[in-house]
Amino acid sequence: MSIDPLPRLKRSMPLTIGQRGEMIGWGYLVKKGYQILEKNYRCPLGEIDVIAQKDKGRRLAFIEIKTRSSHRFGYPEEAVHASKQRKLIRLAQWYLKEKKWGDIAVTFEVLAIDWKGPADPEIRLIENAFSANGDIA
């Protein structure tokens, strides 16, 4: 007799496309050399999908994962518009202050996932997608 590690309620609820994208995204980032420090970090200002170290700990990346099953509402990366960028910058500032990070280089990145049908998703990592001073890469 085997024991099911997931409660019945959780097992009966399918994952959303966004949840599936985040799970795929975490694995992709690790394969690309990122050391994930936080997943779905929450504070009073909102949530950051991923906070990770890169370049052997010399940089801290704040990463937004966006997943789409069609382009009806645009490409995934287009959802990280100016107001979303401003929110991510405020969240990053909160995190850096809360965790008492000293002087460390920070990047904002977007992981765009196109997942159409049963095929493997197309993944695009946009490094330095925007900066804290409002520049868009």
Image: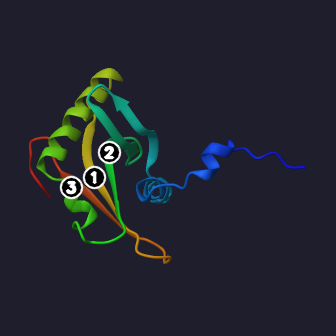
Which element is circle 1 on?
strand
Q: Can you give x and y, in whole percent of width and height, for residue 43 in the image?
A: 33, 27
Q: CA distance from mark 3 to mark 2?
A: 11 Å
Give me the disc on residue 76. Answer: none
The structure residue drawn at horizontal position 15% and vertical position 41%, both measured from the top left corner, is: 86
CB atoms of marks 3 and 1 within 8 Å: yes
Q: Which picture quadrant has residue 56?
A: top left
- Counting residues from the start of the chain, the first of labels 3 and 2 encountered is 2
Which element is circle 2 on?
strand
CB atoms of marks 1 and 2 within 8 Å: yes
Circle 2 residue:
61
Q: Can you give x and y, in whole percent of width and height, for residue 64 in the image?
A: 31, 50
The answer to whether residue 103 is visible is yes
Circle 1 residue:
109
Q: Can you give x and y, in whole percent of width and height, for residue 128 in the image?
A: 22, 54
Foreground: 125 or 1? Answer: 1
Badge 1 local density, few (<14 within 10 Å), some, or many (20+)?
Answer: many
The C terminus: image quadrant: bottom left
Q: Which picture quadrant has residue 44?
A: top left
Which element is circle 3 on?
strand
The structure residue drawn at horizontal position 28% and vertical position 63%, both measured from the top left corner, is: 76
The amino acid beneath tag 3 is Ala
Circle 3 residue:
129
